Image: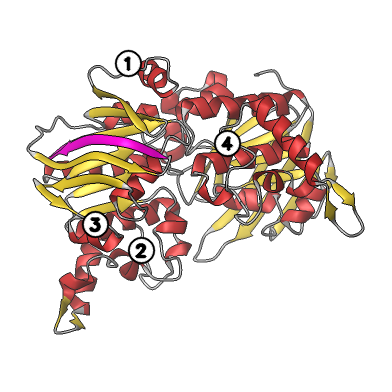
Amino acid sequence: MKAMSENVIFRLDNINKSLGDGFFLQGINLELKAGEIHVVMGENGSGKSAVMQIISGIIQPDTGRLLLNGTGVNISSLSDAWSKSIVYIQQDANIFHNLSVAENIFYHQMPYRNRLFKVIDNNRLNRMCQNLIDDLKLPFSLYDPVHKLGMAQRQIMGFCKAYISGAQVVILDEPSTALTEHDRKILHTILKRMKLRGAGIFYISHKLDEIRGVGDRLSVLKQGRLVGTVDLANTGDDDIIRMMSGVVLKNRYPRLNVKTGKEILRARGLASGNILRGIDFSLHKGEILGITGLAGSGRTFLANCLFGEAPMDRGTIWLNGNKVYIREPYDAISHGLALVPEDRMEDSIMSCLDVTSNASLSSLKRFTRFFTINTTFLNQVVADYISKFNVETEHYSRHMGEYSGGSQQKVVFARWIMNRSKVFILDEPTRCLDIPTRVDIYNSMNDLVLKGAGIIFISSDIEEILGMCDRVMVLSDGRFVCDLPSSDATKEKILSYATGELLS
């Protein structure tokens, strides 16, 4: 996979762009070669996504040139980029929930029985999609309702769109954030095939262990500038982190040895449809319980059931020894449960509201007396928490959608801590976050367990599960198939349980 042509197929030549609030892309020069995977890294807010949006026509540069195969091009929109053989698969895959799996994947290459009247040849479309599913061993069926697919399955659908497009230039923005090791094999197969046909791939990632297996060269952005471009094979992890943040992080997983206390949550016989089948587990005070599994195993659905966001057909939940009934999120919040969902933009962040409103959504009762909110007290508490989380907020009136993903996630954490929650359900909490921000999140988890909270940590990243958790449970086909203390858990053992090779 490392062999690549010296033929430069795309070039950014001295690109400059003002993005508002005093942030600029300045003098960006990048090259993409045929058959190359060019990794782009940088802290949240460094300008990575802005550069990719310029390449794909979402935004236009103020000055500088874009060259495709040595010829200057103007790219006016995403559809114009597609027509020029440039495909951008963004972090949150653009999925049409009202269309079928096949219609989503082949949206830009739809087979028609009558092209004039746009009459789709559904039989041919379904055959094409089934052949793709069989060829790549995709983790979904032709007949699965798209709105019920998980984040990982939707991401894989996005890769498939890029794969079948035959594009020269492919941009993958955080492609593996919700993928398990098993799902990454599908991604790697697609990457290998695209490289072999001569495509060039810009690959945005925050995961050092991941880029070693796929990348050829690495470029790092910081504060809108290109720090440098290096050959990955000759560059160490510490050098990459130093390029990104200016410091070396000695401990990427700062887990504490906290003595666990009494049981604070117990679930017995939880079941819902054909997704969850007899879920049993417990969580103790001061414990970080890791839950992982393949795409479609039920990880996110379990989180939603515990929080009352998804229905349970049967099962019992105890909190601090008392049986509780959680039928909706209000019940969960009232009992001290908190959920940091997998898709923060869709399910957690109110993009049109400011920082204070987002942080205080779940705890307004705490600041209310006689139906009146004490805004002075509220603003002071929010400011204290935001300061502790190192969120850069020059203007509290800015909409939350204008902040980086890392800042958004920290505000979500602050929301639940302000609510004085005691059980935290964290579903992929470090998805799409840079390494320093991930460490901030891990340290926040440490602070929570030191104060007696219990954490259910759901992640597809086995490295962080092993690095941060006291116990590890693996979901497979809607059931827990193991419960391992961290001292016994290994990457190989977890993968074997997840794929059914060690079921006992």
**Amino acid at dot 4:** Phe
Question: How far, Cα to Cα, is label 1 from label 3?
Answer: 33 Å
Q: In this view, does 148 lie above or below 403?
A: above
Quarter of the picture containing the N terminus is top right
Question: Could you tell me the amino acid type at mark 2?
Answer: Thr
Residue 448 at x, y percent in the picture: 18, 46
Mark 3 — residue?
332
Quarter of the C terminus within the rendering: top left
Residue 460 in the image: x percent, y percent?
41, 33
Q: In this view, does 493 lie above or below 199?
A: above
Name the residue located 10 percent from the left edge and 34 percent from the top edge.
260
Please state which of the two labelled residues, at mark 1 or mark 2, is closer to the viewer. Answer: 1
Q: In front: mark 2 or mark 3?
A: 3
**Mark 2 residue element:** loop
Q: Quadrant of residue 250?
A: top left
**Which residue corresponds to the image point at 69% horizontal and 58% vertical from the top-left?**
61
**Secondary-structure class at tag 1:** loop
Question: Who is closer to the viewer here, 397 or 135?
Answer: 135
Q: Seen in the image, is 104 located left or right of residue 445?
A: right
Q: Which of marks 1 and 2 is nearer the N terminus?
A: 2
- 285 falls in the magenta region: yes
Amino acid at the residue labelled 1: Ser
Viewer-proximal residue among 103 and 347: 103
Residue 248 visible here: no
Is any part of residue 411 visible from this angle? yes
